[in-house]
Amino acid sequence: MREVLEGSQAVAEAVRLARVKVISAYPITPQTHIVEELAKYCADGSLDGRFICVESEHSAMASVIGAESGGVRSFTASSSHGLALMHEMLHWAAGARLPIVMAEVNRALGPGWNLWVDQTDSLSQRDTGWLQFYCSDGQEALDTTLLAYRLAEILNLPIMVVMDAFFLSHTYEPVDVPSQADVDAFLPPYEPKFLMDTKNPYALDEVAPINVYMEMRRSIQMAMEAAPGIYQAIEDEFYTRFGRRYGLVEPYRCEDADIVFVTAGTAAATARVAVDTLRAKGERVGLLRLRMFRPFPAEAFRLGLAHAKKVIVLDRNCSFGAGGVFAQELKAALYGPEAPKLYSYVAGMGGRDVTVDTFSELFTMTRDQDEPPLGSVWYGVNEEMLRS
Amino acid sequence: MSNDSVNTFNVSLFFPKSSTSTVTNKTGTWSFMRPSYLEKTAPCSVHCPCGQDIPRIEMLVSRGQIAAAWNTILAENPLPGTCGRVCFHPCEKACNRGQFDEAVSINAIERYLDDAAWAASIAPAAARGSAKGRRIAIVGSGPAGLAASYFLSMLGYECEIFEAAEEPGGILRYGIPAYRLPNEVLDREIARIRALGVMIHCARAVDSAFLEGAKHTYDAVFLSCGNGASMKLGVPGEELALDGLAFLRSAKQGEGAARTISVKPHGSAIVVGGGNTAIDVARSLRRLGVSPTIVYRRRREDMPAFEHEVARALEEGVRMVELRAPLALARLDGGIELKVQKMRPAGVGADGRMRVVPDGDATELIFADALYSAVGATHAESWMVPPDDGRVVRLSHAAAFWDAPVGIPLLYGGDPVNENESVADAIASGKQAAIALDVFFQKGAGAVKAELARCAVGDGTSLSMEIYLGGPRANRSGRVVSFKDIPTDYFSPSEKKRGASLPPERAIASFEEIESSLDAAEAAMQAERCFNCGICNDCDNCRTYCPELAITALRAGRRDDWSTEAGPARAINSDYCKGCGICAAECPRCAMIIEEQQS
Amino acid sequence: MQEIRFHGRGGQGTVLASIALAKAFFLAGKWVQTFPVFGSERRGAPVEAYLRLDDSKIYLRSNVYEPDHVVVQDARLLQIVDVTKGLKPGGWILLNAPGVPRGVERFKGFRLACVDASRIALEYGLGSKTQPITNTSMMGAFARLFGMPPLELVTAAIEREMPVKIAENIAAAKAAYDALHEYGLLDDALVASAAKTARAEAAL
């Protein structure tokens, strides 16, 4: 049934439908409404789960690791500094091969203090062994959360469902909430491949000597490599049941496009409007929305950009000293003589709006420039402020 | 597509998980060292002439187990109320805690325990042993005689004490002033001994003829007559001196009696001597308003009197003249003029004490209203001490004449045979005699020395009745715990405390007891300071720190009844003990050992 | 696509009104999108919220810069906030005021509608004299002004969204629905007449 939900509520709905048993979260800034909603569900009985209010995000992740090790589906949510505090435990969750799903609302890291959208927080965690999916609207946030549980429990790897602060987390829009019966059919009860069991004791997360550690890391990489294929199979099933699909990357009007935008999150939704606007003016432009970031879907990008001459990557993030993260990753994935020219732009950090006009300007700049500059170009920066 | 087809994806899952638990890893096979629980001997116990189980007593007090603690004393010492007041407590000098901050208040805690047990009417656990059908005569009811009767009763002997005085107690009743030991305390201790069936005949002086005929009624005689005869000054005019012991005896009978042998108030007195008697005489005189001056031929630090008693005497206004030897006494103006020779130290003698020699021919005259002699005492009659006979067996605290001409064994104890004249040493001699007699009757004279060695506490001369009787303490190692054996990181410095004392100006106003008892909370806190050297107090540090979980709890929690629950409440599982030694190293009490494994 | 901007103060329920209206429009078959201007959420501070309406899925997720209409929940905001910033010419200003306020000459070229929402709110016991809760009254006036969403869907949304005093809120919405005064395009004549009224009031 379709109803008007806030982005945070859409995620909470998905967690309720997934029949998650343990939710552990730190409730203070930079937390979002997601866990507020889930606490309500646990309290009023609409979710048969236990809400653990912990004293820090590090503990939140530690306790879902405990819950998941005990064989129950679990969930947490965080943002920016909270996610940064979790960092050590994020590695642990992946190393312990626990299919934890968390919602991560992209918010800027301080100082200066800023609660607005910025993807640097989640991208800083790219090497922790977590899968990452970036969502563009409330419906996708709900659907991706359900898909994530299904995928994580096959891969035995944790998944981050990433969404922009405010432009998605605090925005109300119609969302189709599937029935519990349909979700139950798609996402059966969690059957852990291993769990802490007093009747059948064994040791978990123990010492890994030199002769096994690298194999364990190789195993994570192998599971990551298998993820795109498995995801597509799961999404096929999801499509059959719910009529929606997103892909690893989502192409829009790319078929004959000379110039293709690549970006993620809510900016990618606005980019779609920009593509329509530019197309109306006769420009051959398309959009290839990045959805899966880890594992990086290099093959999907190569296919999706096979005919593009230029690629405009808009990064709402920066790896300082290198530039926009999506652009770097994409450049590496496309490397070779056939690669389109890649134009990297850093924009929209710390909540600065990314509008249709933003894309139109980036398009014009790119179209009129034969060779891309070496690094990332920062768009919309007031240079006056930096002169001193 | 069905769930099944999707779920058939074969995903690599190699991660840290082993189905073999640590249980299968028998770390015990790595071991070449093996820890074990082995309780050891505390230095305080070794130095306690009575061999009391001090670390256990302190542990029980710290837990509030007053009855158990008190009975632990009574197992080794029948006179805790007395010793808690007058003992010179060598235990505290030996206390390992003394090397950390200050020794444990063992003496004050003993006093507290006896007062608390009395106030709570706790019944003593010590009982008369099963009758052995033998009767022992004991001459003298001082601490040695009382102790001998007590321990012999515990061993099943019928005891009769013959006391020349009107009331029992000897030196305790007639020699130690009331401000140190009130008679009520002594009375309750003697009542406890009588309750064991000991018969005390007072005002029954005996003589050598008694010994001759004793064999008809008794199987042995224990002579503990004490040193009742004061020694003479040995200088011209010595007959002018008053007898210090006689003065103390009258003082104990009340102030009125004391005055009959004292000078008038505000008068002055000279007390000659450096032992406890001299100090007691001077302090008693002070309480009668007299200004006493102690004249001693050596230095203050050479005095045989207990140091704390000397200090207290000076606080109370007793004056002291050191290095002055009496030369002659003379009457002068109704008083006494004492001529003294100035002395000087002349090196340490063979006995370890500083010798003194005349400092040229310098002399001085000291005047006082009276002079009291307290230069030592000796036995009153020759039969009271062992004869000079090669067959007499000299023990550390007693002498035994097994085949005495009187036809039954004669044993000698107390001050006449003790190197150290103290109440605790007197009790030790009573205990030694009792054990020796029991061994003699059970196994013969030849077994005595070995049996005494078996029940010695650590490497000292003190004996333990509990060890003799095969109690849990018998399982302890005689190895004495030293300060370096204690991991002191487990202890924080804290203050030593005794019971409150009357201020000197109030103390000298009467014969009221000077020191009061600790209260229960203070006593527990003071007892908690004890390292409990060598004994397990169930702290569970071993179990907490064992990295292989190789230590199992045999019982939950702590032992309540130490008299029946022998040994620790924990066991070491050799399947998993890898011999790392952490348990032994982290035992705050040094109650474990680690040794090379026997193959 | 229509874009509407709401102006209010923290504590007046402005954001809640935009959400409730969005839900009423959704019930009427529209695609909707609403979100507040994200900043410090402090009582009394000027707040803004946006509402987008369309007949198909809304992809645009940037802020609203050129609204079709604005709703001003507190007339005193006119002194400190430029409520017509970016407002499309001919767009409606729905104002909580008993009548045409002073200084309307700067709003020439826009259309004005007023409702005395503060009075209505107080009449139904919503909020206090200094802080009337006017959001539901403004929703009723909004439904009357635009003919959308239908009043019964507005009351349905109020029933679902308002945490307390549901009956009073619905009554207030209905009363405001009836009390709306549409002045229409602010042209020279209307501005002159408003100025005259203001002078007359001042003379009193």
Image (cartoon, helix red, strand yellow):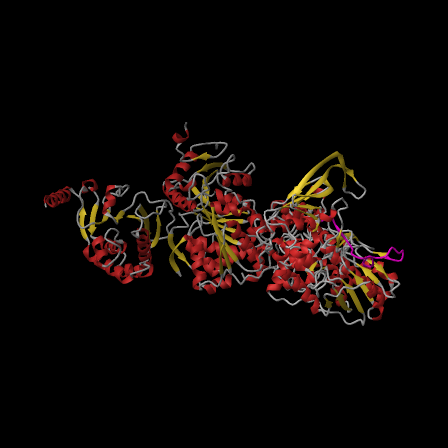
Q: Report if residue B598 is visible in the image.
A: yes
Q: Residue furthest top?
A: A388
Q: Relative to A378, say whether B242 is above or below.
A: below
Judging depth in this view, the residue of A145 and B246 nearest the camera is B246
State which quadrant residue B569 falls in.
bottom right
Q: Residue at x 44, y 56 (%)?
A: A12
Q: Position of residue B574 (x, y in %)?
A: 75, 58
Residue B515 in the figure: left or right of residue C76? right
Q: Which residues are magenta?
A: B374-392
Q: Position of residue C82 (x, y in %)?
A: 26, 41
Magenta stretch, main secondary structure class: loop
Judging depth in this view, the residue of B505 and B486 nearest the camera is B505
Q: Residue at x 44, y 45 (%)?
A: A107
State which quadrant residue B185 falls in.
bottom right
Judging depth in this view, the residue of B6 and B523 nearest the camera is B523
Q: Residue furthest front?
A: B333
Residue B57 in the figure: left or right of residue A170? right
Q: Position of residue B171 (x, y in %)?
A: 71, 57
Verify whether residue B391 appears in magenta.
yes
Judging depth in this view, the residue of C11 and B355 nearest the camera is B355
Verify whether residue B183 appears in magenta.
no
Q: Report if residue B569 is visible in the image.
A: no
State which quadrant residue B417 falls in.
bottom right
- What is the number of callouts on the image? 0
Q: Position of residue B287 (x, y in %)?
A: 60, 51
